[in-house]
């Protein structure tokens, strides 16, 4: 996918951004994603299971994440599904981070100008 | 511990409201994640637990709606080239044949019609036996009505638990009817309180604009998703339209023919579910409609009980033409309900598989078609409820000049533009002449019942005679041709020059 196509997908919603950020370091299962999002947003974004899996489905459909069988669950049950960023997903995330960085730079410049 | 289990059970029920496909993919995971969240939060006390539950409840309706919307979009996007591949409840083959339902399930599909046949029969018997029997008949009818309502609820719960198999569509049609009737009654009740505008105008708008549009959209979506279910949902609406023909006919004959018609519908619904064949189903539904139409319109013309001096235009004794006048328009209307969504489905399927041109061809023609439909509905509403309202708004002369012809012209331009794009798409993919001709025929048929009579109507006030002539001469061949086309195998199976599916 060309860079312009990726840029057309931006900006991401807050929930999507946090879900993708939570997968940036390593693949995670559903509950771990919920916890990580809560932790990354300092308790501000609390995902319900419905919202989480709705978002995961969209991300899977768009090819931004992929799902594989992980290790067994904590109670020794059947393997849990694990979600990971795809190469495309990582490019989208990078694009969004870049966009936010530019935005902040502009905001800081403007704010500094106002202070002067 | 027991409380946590209870919460997980409740959550399991909430998950059942997600679409089947979504549940199959994520349902188990969602339940596991929720159980894990509950287990961890319980250890922190009841306030965080209540917070978790409230959060789930707050987000649940939106999440369910979004999941349904996504699934619907997915289905429409992946609408297969071949016919009827998407099925819920039973597997289907590419030419619209579904796995035959077991007899028990097929009988469940026919059961709601059998109920109504029984209710009509009770009515006929009580009408025939005099006042005492009439009172008993009322009690039996109320009991049967109650039993039907209970069966409806039981069938819906059962169908929900079984993942909405095909037979459930028969019952869903009744839920739709019930919903529309309740809304209509609510408007009437509002009319009693708020005055005549609500009683007449709002009811007219509802009956002649809202209901047809809602039905058209619902049937089109259903025809896209599953044609077998579409047929089963449609049957009660077909019969209901025919019931209007029986107005003024005598009792108990009216009840007897109604009872036979619903029995016929029960048989057709059972056979459709049992055979699982869309093709046969289309012809069976049309045959039922014709048989019911012949009987009802004969009863409606030859066995009327008119009070002296009432309806103008009814001849006594009635003639063959009177019978035909009652039969043909309703036959065309019922057939339109059946064939139009299937024709559009064909065009859409073709449009989706012939690149950008084909897609735009379909979109433009669909806009044109809906505009024409809207215009015709407005006209019929106008003619039924009197032109006073519109004339008051725009003035008589203005309405005479306007006469919706602008809307009609715009609609035709859209439709023609769509047809041209389709034609170019056909040439570009080098489709065989035979298939191309069939598809263009579908294109013409989709618009045929809506257009030819309109320019004549616009220039003349003698529209009943003209439209009657058009309906009689062209209506029946249109039905036959349309039914042949939509039930024909392989027209939607577009292949490219190399014979590969596009």
Image: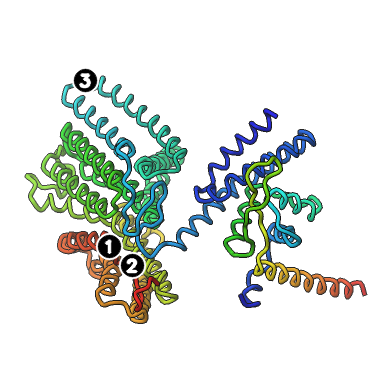
In the image, which is nearer the foreground, mark 3 or mark 1?
Answer: 1
Q: Do callouts 3 and 2 mark residues in contact (Cβ within 8 Å)? A: no
Q: Position of residue B411 (x, y in %)?
A: 36, 70
Which residue is the site of mark 3? Answer: B133
Name the residue beneath numbered marker 1. Answer: B489
Q: Earlier in the sequence, mark 3 or mark 2?
A: 3
> Mark 3 and mark 2: span between their CA atoms?
58 Å
In the image, is A99 to the left or to the right of B61?
right
Which residue is depicted at the point 62% across and 52% down?
A53
Q: Secondary structure at mark 3?
A: helix
Q: State if disc 2 and disc 1 touch (CB < 8 Å).
A: yes
Is any atom of residue B180 visible in this view? no
Crowd around label 3: few <14 · some 14–19 · many ≥20 (10 Å): some
User: Label 2: chain?
Assistant: B
Q: Which residue is mark 2?
A: B493
Earlier residue among tags 3 and 1: 3
Give the x, y percent position of residue A14.
71, 59
Quarter-of-image position of residue B457: bottom left
Residue A5, relative to residue B157: is it above or below? below
Given residues A98 and B374, the one toward you in this image is A98
The quadrant the N terminus of chain B occupies is top right
| Quadrant hosting residue B125 | top left
- Is disc 2 placed on a helix, strand or loop? loop
Subunit that carries the residue with mark 1: B
For the residues labelled 1 and 2, the Cα–Cα distance comes to 8 Å
- In this view, the residue farthest toward the right is A116
Tell me the chain of label 3.
B
Q: Which quadrant holds residue B58?
A: top right
Q: Along the horizontal axis of the image, is B60 left or right of B501?
A: right
């Amino acid at each position: 996918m060309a860079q312009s196509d990726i840029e057309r997908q931006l900006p991401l919603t807050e929930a999507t951004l946090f879900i993708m950020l939570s997968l940036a370091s390593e693949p995670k299962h559903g509950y771990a994603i919920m916890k990580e999002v809560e932790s990354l947003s300092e308790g501000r974004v609390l995902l319900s299971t419905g919202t989480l899996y709705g978002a995961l489905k969209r991300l899977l459909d768009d090819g931004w994440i992929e799902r594989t069988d992980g290790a067994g669950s904590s109670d020794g049950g059947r393997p849990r599904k694990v979600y990971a960023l795809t190469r495309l997903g990582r490019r989208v995330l990078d694009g969004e981070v870049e966009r936010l960085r530019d935005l902040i730079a502009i905001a800081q410049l403007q704010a500094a100008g106002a202070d002067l | 511990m027991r409380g946590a289990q209870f919460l997980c059970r409740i959550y399991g029920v909430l998950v059942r409201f997600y679409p089947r496909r979504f549940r199959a993919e994520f349902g188990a995971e969602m339940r596991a994640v929720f159980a894990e969240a509950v287990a961890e939060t319980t250890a922190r006390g009841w306030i965080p637990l209540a917070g978790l539950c409230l959060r789930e409840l707050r987000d649940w309706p939106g999440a369910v709606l979004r999941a349904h919307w996504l699934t619907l979009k997915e289905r429409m996007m992946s609408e297969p080239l071949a016919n009827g591949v998407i099925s819920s409840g039973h597997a289907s083959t590419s030419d619209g044949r579904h796995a035959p339902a077991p007899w028990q399930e097929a009988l469940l599909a026919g059961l709601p019609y059998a109920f109504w046949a029984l209710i009509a029969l009770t009515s006929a018997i009580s009408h025939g036996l005099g006042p005492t029997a009439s009172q008993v008949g009322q009690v039996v009818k109320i009991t049967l009505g109650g039993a039907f309502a209970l069966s409806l609820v039981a069938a819906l719960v059962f169908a929900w638990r079984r993942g909405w198999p095909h037979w459930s569509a028969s019952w869903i049609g009744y839920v739709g009817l019930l919903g529309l009737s309740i809304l209509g009654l609510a408007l009437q009740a509002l009319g009693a309180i708020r005055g005549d505008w609500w009683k007449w105008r709002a009811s007219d708008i509802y009956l002649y604009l809202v209901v047809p549009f809602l039905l058209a959209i619902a049937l089109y979506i259903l025809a896209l998703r599953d044609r077998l279910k579409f047929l089963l949902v449609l049957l009660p609406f077909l019969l209901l339209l025919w019931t209007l023909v029986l107005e003024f006919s005598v009792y108990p004959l009216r009840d007897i023919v109604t009872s036979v018609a619903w029995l016929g519908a029960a048989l057709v619904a059972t056979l459709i579910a049992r055979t699982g064949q869309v093709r046969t189903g289309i012809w069976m539904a049309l045959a039922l409609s014709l048989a019911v139409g012949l009987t009802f319109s004969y009863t409606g013309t030859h066995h009327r009980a008119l009070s002296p001096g009432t309806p103008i235009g009814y001849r006594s004794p009635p003639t063959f033409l009177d019978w035909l006048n009652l039969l043909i328009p309703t036959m065309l209307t019922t057939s339109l309900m059946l064939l139009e969504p299937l024709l559009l489905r064909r065009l859409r399927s073709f449009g989706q598989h012939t690149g950008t041109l084909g897609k735009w061809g379909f979109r433009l023609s669909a806009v044109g078609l809906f505009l024409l439909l809207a215009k015709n509905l407005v006209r019929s509403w106008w003619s039924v409820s009197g032109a006073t309202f519109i004339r008051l708004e725009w003035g008589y002369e203005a309405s005479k000049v306007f006469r919706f012809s602008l809307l009609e012209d715009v609609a035709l331009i859209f439709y023609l533009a769509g047809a041209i794009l389709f034609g170019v798409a056909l040439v570009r993919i080098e489709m065989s002449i035979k298939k191309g001709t069939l598809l263009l025929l579908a294109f013409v048929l989709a618009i045929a019942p809506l257009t030819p009579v309109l320019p004549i109507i616009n220039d003349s006030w003698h529209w009943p005679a003209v439209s009657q002539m058009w309906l009689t001469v062209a209506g029946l061949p249109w039905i036959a041709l349309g039914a042949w086309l939509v039930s024909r195998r392989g027209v939607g199976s577009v292949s490219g020059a190399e014979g590969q599916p596009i």
